Image (cartoon, rainbow, N blue to C red):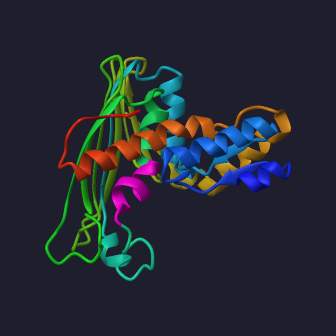
Amino acid sequence: AIQCMDAGRHVITEKPFAQTMAECERMVEAAERCGRKLAVHQNYRWNPGNFAARHLIQTGWIGKPFFASIEIFGSQDVGLAKHDFYAKCDDFLTIQWNNHLVDLLRCWVGMDAHRVLTRTRRMEGQNFVSDNLLISLHEFSDGVTGNIVHSELLRSSLRRQECRVDGDEGSLVFDFQKTLALESRRLEGGPRRIDFAQGGWVSSFAGSMGDFLAAIEQDREPAVSGRANLATIRTILAEQVSARAGGVWVTCV
């Protein structure tokens, strides 16, 4: 990435941005030194439910958020059991997965966590090297709390994914791709629902790539610039430290 920017190219990277803060900071410094755009492909921000939720929160439909949660119950310990990387890495949920989920919490509440507490556990006979059950609590400023519950250990078809953001004027309940429910004091008649299956949404990768290209054309910072993504990396590294210590509060520094 640094060689590309030194050669005068704008750069968009995969995620996680890197696995040490030093590597991330070197890339950010290179972008600023070279006057190049540097973005991170945090494409989950552009999944329909996640994108719509952020817009509804920003425009005040649920008031001031005080709680944001992501719960995922999946079966990748089975489906990806022979994957050359994921099945063998030691940070599947804390780093490889939570670079998505931590970034979403930050996106929805509009601030960075200042400390986290994370526990991970195993199932006897699981296939992955790393623990495949995670529970993580995030403390933001102004009394805002975040929560991630994630299991990839299911041996059943009862998979589920649910996100919610509660504010002092209403609530959003949604998944990444299909549906969203909004109840707000600004609306009468109970919850309103959106079915994203009817929307003709393009791939989330088109969202992050499109924003990157627009940032170059408009000479502005990408929505997920390298510098903006530093807080996501700080948070997932703090989660990793907390989990390895058995679940203690760790400051995101």
Q: Which residues are magenta?
A: 90-100
Q: Residue at x 57, y 51 (%)?
A: 43
- Is residue 233 positioned above or below 114 on the image? below
Res 94 quadrant in image: bottom left
Q: Residue at x 61, y 51 (%)?
A: 41
Pick the quarter of the image with the N terminus.
bottom right
Tell me residue 80's x, y (percent).
38, 76
Tell me residue 118's x, y (percent).
25, 45
Res 86 quadrant in image: bottom left
Q: Residue at x 81, y 49 (%)?
A: 6
Question: Is residue 169 visible to the viewer in this orientation of the structure?
Answer: yes
Of residues 202 and 222, the one nearer the viewer is 222
Q: Is residue 66 left or right of residue 63?
A: left
Q: Residue at x 78, y 49 (%)?
A: 5
Residue 121 lies in the magenta-colored region: no
Question: Is residue 193 visible to the viewer in this orientation of the structure?
Answer: no
Pick the quarter of the image with the C terminus.
top left
Q: Is residue 114 left or right of residue 42?
A: left
Of residues 19 and 101, the one nearer the viewer is 19
